Image: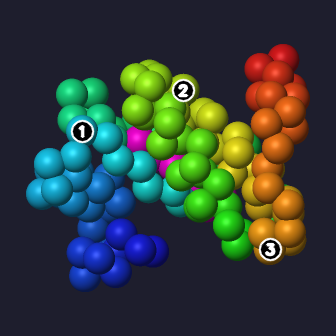
Amino acid sequence: MELRLATHDNLSPLNVLLNKVAKSLHCHHAVVTQGHRGSLVYHDKNGILEVPAFSREVVDRVGAGDAFLSVTSPCVASGFPDELIGFIGNAVGALAIRIIGNRTPVEPLSLYKYIRTLLK
């Protein structure tokens, strides 16, 4: 929703808006979360990658975007592949939407266990 508000565009597909904004800001990487539809990961050399969501069970969305950003930012800075950035971000987002408000953070051990479960 924030991307649509920033671009004043309610009609264009999100991948078009993401590409437009990233290029105008000269970003090498950008991500848009889409709730139950997953996320879009932009890379200036690789284009846009769609990553599915891992949970549809929503308790509270408050803080999920912050959790996503706090985990994916270091991944981008470390040079992780786009697929891994989206995967890790959506995994932490899936855990964050199960927490009411910002009562507790997503703990690293919980994230590791969840990722292990997803990969099985």
Q: CA distance from mark 3 to mark 2?
A: 26 Å
Residue at 53% x, 59% y is 34
Q: CA distance from mark 1 to mark 3?
A: 32 Å
Q: Amino acid at mark 2?
A: Leu
Residue at 79% x, 49% y is 106
Relative to the observer, which residue lies in front, 90 or 66? Answer: 66
Toward which corner of the image does residue 110 lie, by quadrant? top right
Residue at 70% x, 72% y is 62
**75 shown above or below 120:** below
Q: Local crowd at mark 1 within 10 Å, few (<14), some, or many (≥20)? A: few
Residue 37 magenta-highlighted = yes
Residue 82 drawn at (x, y percent): 43, 29
Q: Which mark is residue 101?
A: 3
Q: Which residue is mark 2?
A: 84
Image quadrant containing the N terminus = bottom left
Q: Which residues are magenta?
A: 35-41
Q: Which mark is residue 28?
A: 1
